[in-house]
Image (cartoon, rainbow, N blue to C red):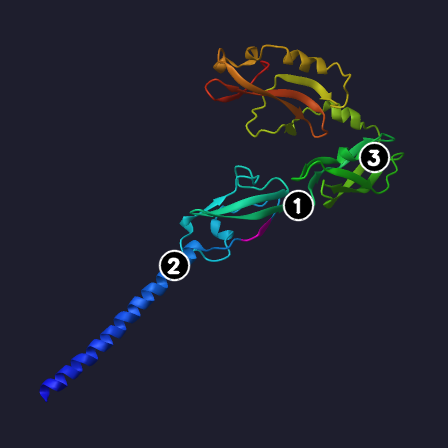
Amino acid sequence: MEDEIYVGMESRMSTKTKVIIFTIFFMIIISAIIVFFKSNNFDIKKTVIYEVGDKISLDVTDYIKNKPYNANDYKLVLDSVRYDSNNTLDTVGEYTYRVVLKDIIKEGKIIVKDTKGPIVQTMDVTIGVNEKYKVEDFVVKCNDYSLPCEYEMTGNADTSKAGIYELKINSKDTYGNKSTNTVNLIVKEGYSLQDAKLKDLTPMYLEPNYEDWNNQYVIKYAGGLDPEDEDSPRWNYYYEFLDSNYADFLDDKHKGMKIESSEIIAVYNQYHYIIGFACRVKLSDGSITYLTNGE
């Protein structure tokens, strides 16, 4: 009788163990199936929308709908998307992106929109009595990814007598986004806006713009040059430089070095008149410098 009781208990223990083992084994299989499914089946966002000027995400998980089991297994391909070295989306458009997992490739769209009005920097303008002016005289700079900006001025000003007149500058980019600035037109006896444009020799901006410019000119004018005045004799200095040997304008530190490439830069005052030209060059050793006229 004791043997029979012992055998019965042993049989019941074996069944319980088998159930536990089977349960563990079943859970392992289910987990493996889930892992395999997550690893080989994924869905991406059909459309991702950005505003121009936003920084694009380089994180693949921002483009996948379901949570990936291991994000490192996925590759995000953005070859067709236009963005700068700071990951800033600088061009409106519709682009294709891809997410790759092993031999599975899925495509979606990145849409870059421009829905914001331009940021326009303006200034008050002073003119003489009965002197003409234009809307561009009030605009210092238009910051927008959809240039050029167009301007329209509203308000009334009686230029026949001295006074201060408030005007509105309405700006619009190429996608029709608008912004408005308030400016003052100051009409002053004995003043000339034209003379101010010619006499202002303070550099305000460059075209094209480089932050490393060191105030070295290859051409420096004694007065402002209206860029629309094609008959001005001051252009002759510019043309003469174009025909010259650029190596003659290297400073003493770089004399004798070979110039690999060059770019001429116009220097403007606040009235958008050219006050000189700079020349940025790349030398044979890869360094960047500016040519000089010796001043």
Quadrant where the N terminus sits is bottom left
Q: Residues within 10 Å of mark 1 (few under 14, many from 20)?
A: many
- Cα–Cα gap, marks 3 and 2: 77 Å
**Is 15 left or right of 95, judged from the image as shown?**
left
| Residue occupied by mark 1 | 114
Say which quarter of the image contains residue 197: top right
Residue sitting at x 77%, y 38%: 151
Q: Please provide percent x and percent y for residue 261.
A: 55, 19
- Cα–Cα gap, marks 3 and 1: 38 Å
Q: Which element is circle 2 on?
A: helix
| Residue occupied by mark 3 | 187
Magenta stretch bounds: 45-49
Above or below residue 88? Residue 8 is below
- Cα–Cα gap, marks 1 and 2: 41 Å
Label pair 3/1, CB-CB below 8 angstroms: no
Label pair 3/2, CB-CB below 8 angstroms: no
Q: Please provide percent x and percent y for residue 191.
A: 81, 28
Q: Nearer the viewer, mark 3 or mark 1?
A: 1
Q: Nearer the viewer, mark 1 or mark 2?
A: 2
Q: Please provide percent x and percent y for residue 70.
A: 40, 53
Above or below residue 147? Residue 231 is above
Q: Residues within 10 Å of mark 3 (few under 14, many from 20)?
A: many
| Residue occupied by mark 2 | 35
Residue sitting at x 50%, y 53%: 64
Q: Residues within 10 Å of mark 2 (few under 14, many from 20)?
A: some
Say which quarter of the image contains residue 95: top right
Residue sitting at x 20%, y 76%: 14
Quadrant where the C terminus sits is top right
Above or below residue 160? Residue 283 is above
Q: Earlier in the sequence, mark 1 or mark 2?
A: 2
The verdict on residue 218 being magenta is: no
Q: Mark 2 belongs to which amino acid? A: Val
